[in-house]
Image (cartoon, rainbow, N blue to C red):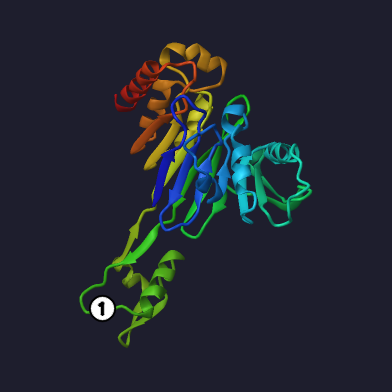
């Protein structure tokens, strides 16, 4: 369902691209200085998910904007409190006297206190905020066959983690003597709403829906998480376990080696073995360490990854 690619190199600021099977669009998590992110990938992006706006997570937004201008698309931007003004200020720092209306528009969804979501649009030539409304929902983005939830973590500022969830697929395995037809679609709908006593006619015979539910097979949707900068605290770990347990795949920050744990605590970051440990506790099927301090050489990053893997598997 989801194909994830880290577009930044180990010595670059973090940027992750998520493609979705049978979708013509893709999705970007954080806007680090990723040289591997192509013009077409920027233009085909339907939504951008920002964890927080420290420079190493937001510096490349202008490049993405540059490539999206003129596509005429509406692009969603999700992020922490302050993201509306920050995106607007970045855009309005440029001169737009030659831009046409409809060249691009941005729908910005700002996650505030208690998970309250404020939504505005920005569009040329004036780029003024037009309020759409507010909501309170753990789902920040939704498409036909997947949706994205969020969790607010502490990085001495709000840092938003995201989880992409494919919707469950409801299939049917027909018993002997049963043939497909309109009743199959009806049975699936009754199953979704837990209607046990609906009458379903199959080949001239009426059945209670609950007596046919045994033919329903549910294929669980894939779940992919992106957890960026966060303090290795009890409260953060509690939230991570609540939201990301038993995920299929998680990309998690490992900014520091274990030897630099003091720096991690001072700067509200996680470190190698602690990130590995929380992934083990979450029983994540595939956990990938990302976003390393640029002070490390290649061999030190290799050591960091080894520390992560040992903690994840021990």
Local packing at callout 1 (Cα closer than 10 Å; few below 14, some 14-19, many 20+) is: few
What percent of the width, then of the height, locates residue 117?
66, 46
Looking at the image, is 187 positioned above or below residue 99?
below
Q: Residue furthest left?
A: 176
The part of the image, by quadrant, that contains residue 245 is top left
Residue 298 in view of the camera: yes
Q: Nearer the viewer, residue 86 or 138?
A: 86
Residue at the (41%, 49%) spot, across then down:
2
Which image quadrant: the C terminus? top left
**Horizontal relation, residue 172 to residue 9: left or right:** left
Query: Badge 1 is on which residue?
Result: 178
Residue 128 place in picture, x, y as percent: 78, 47
Q: Could you tell me if residue 246 is visible in this image?
A: no
The residue drawn where x is 41% and y is 37% is: 250
Element marked by disc 1? loop
Q: Is residue 213 above or below residue 53?
A: below
In the rendered view, tell whether residue 287 sits above or below residue 254: below
Q: Is residue 205 left or right of residue 238?
A: left
Q: Position of residue 52 (x, y in %)?
A: 60, 33
Coordinates of residue 279 in the picture (x, y in percent) = 39, 31
Residue 187 versus residue 231: which sits nearer the camera?
A: 231
Q: Quadrant of residue 258?
A: top left
Residue 102 position by quadrant: bottom right
């Amino acid at each position: 369902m989801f194909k994830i690619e880290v577009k930044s190199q180990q010595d670059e600021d973090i940027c992750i691209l998520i493609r979705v099977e049978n979708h013509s669009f893709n999705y970007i998590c954080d806007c680090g200085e990723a040289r591997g992110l192509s013009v077409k990938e920027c233009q085909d992006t339907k939504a951008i998910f920002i964890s927080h706006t420290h420079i190493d997570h937001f510096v490349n937004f202008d490049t993405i904007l540059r490539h999206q201008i003129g596509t005429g698309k509406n692009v969603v931007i999700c992020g922490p409190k302050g993201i509306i003004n920050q995106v607007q200020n970045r855009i309005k720092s440029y001169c737009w006297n030659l831009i046409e209306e409809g060249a691009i528009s941005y729908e910005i969804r700002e996650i505030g206190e208690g998970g309250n979501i404020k939504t505005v649009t920005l569009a040329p030539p004036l780029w003024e905020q037009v309020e759409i409304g507010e909501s309170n929902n753990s789902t920040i983005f939704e498409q036909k066959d997947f949706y994205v939830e969020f969790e607010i973590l502490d990085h001495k500022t709000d840092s938003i983690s995201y989880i992409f969830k494919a919707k469950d697929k409801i299939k049917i395995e027909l018993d002997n003597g049963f043939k497909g037809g309109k009743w199959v679609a009806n049975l699936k709908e009754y199953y979704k709403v837990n209607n046990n006593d609906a009458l379903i006619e199959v080949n001239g015979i009426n059945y209670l829906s609950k007596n046919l539910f045994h033919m329903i097979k549910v294929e669980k949707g894939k779940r992919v998480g992106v957890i960026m900068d966060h303090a290795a605290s009890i409260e953060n770990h509690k939230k991570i376990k609540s939201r990301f347990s038993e995920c299929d795949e998680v990309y998690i920050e490992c900014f520091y080696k274990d030897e630099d744990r003091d720096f991690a605590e001072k700067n509200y970051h996680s470190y190698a073995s602690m990130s590995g440990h929380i992934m083990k506790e979450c029983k994540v099927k595939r956990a990938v360490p990302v976003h390393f301090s640029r002070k490390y050489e290649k061999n030190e990053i290799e050591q960091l990854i080894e520390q992560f893997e040992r903690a994840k598997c021990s």
